[in-house]
Image: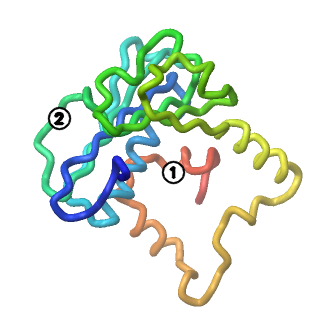
Amino acid sequence: MSCMSDEPGVRMHEIRWHGRGGQGAVTSSKILAEAAFRSGWSGVTAAPSFGAERRGAPITASTRMDREPIRILSQVTTPDVVVVLDDSLLAVANPAAGLKPGGVVIVNTVRPRAELAIPADVRVVTADVTGSALLQMHSHQGRRRRTSRPRASPSSVRTREERDERTRDIDVPPERWRGRRHG
């Protein structure tokens, strides 16, 4: 059975993100919370946790999703899912700490599972997300990046005002969207 489900009566889902300052863990947490809310989850929270605010420093972020309002504002300590954006953090932190039984750790890495400093009894999923993103970026280098956008149809064409209305409450500044300014 999946550790995440939107079936009625299923408990709150808690996700903890591990990354380094500037890698997007906080932004990812906020985007997931916003997407969950827009998908009908009435209770969602997203919160960062970091010490000295500098690029490259280890940080964590938390996302909670529930069908009911959430009144817990603390950081996630017993996650269902842990996402590790930088596998070098496995040497300085224990991301699997507190993982619920049946939970999963997702690691952005090229290394095989056997080389990761994660207990053998923990379910682990690995993916070279950075490599895939770089490959995608380089395959579009020198030409316009239209392939990542949906094709226009009469029902999908929006005016700037409609787009702004649909996205005004997303807590990610426009200059962070796809790494460039829109306007």
The residue positioned 66% from the left and 66% from the top of the image is 149
Tell me the mark number nearer the camera, choosing from 1 and 2: 2
The residue positioned 20% from the left and 59% from the top of the image is 42
Pointer 1 and pointer 2: residues touching (CB < 8 Å)? no
The residue positioned 81% from the left and 60% from the top of the image is 144
Among the 4 quarters of the image, the one containing residue 39? bottom left
Residue at numbered disc 1: 174
The crowd level at tag 2 (other Cα within 10 Å; few <14, some 14-19, many 20+) is few
Q: Is the C terminus in the top left, top right, bottom left or bottom right quadrant? A: bottom right
Determine if residue 25 is in view: no
**Image side of residue 126 versus residue 37, left or right:** right
| Residue 165, percent from left and from top | 39, 69
Observer-nearest residue: 98 or 55? Answer: 98
- Vertical arrangement, residue 183 with respect to residue 76, above or below: below
The residue positioned 69% from the left and 62% from the top of the image is 148
Residue at numbered disc 2: 73
Disc with the residue nearer the chain's start (1 vs 2): 2
The crowd level at tag 1 (other Cα within 10 Å; few <14, some 14-19, many 20+) is some
| Residue 139, percent from left and from top | 84, 51
- Specify the amino acid type for callout 1: Pro
Name the mark on residue 22: none
- Vertical arrangement, residue 177 with respect to residue 155, above or below: above
Residue projecting furthest to the right: 142
| Residue 136, percent from left and from top | 76, 49
Judged from the image, the secondary structure of the residue bearing numbered disc 1 is: helix
Determine if residue 65 is in view: yes
- Specify the amino acid type for callout 2: Leu
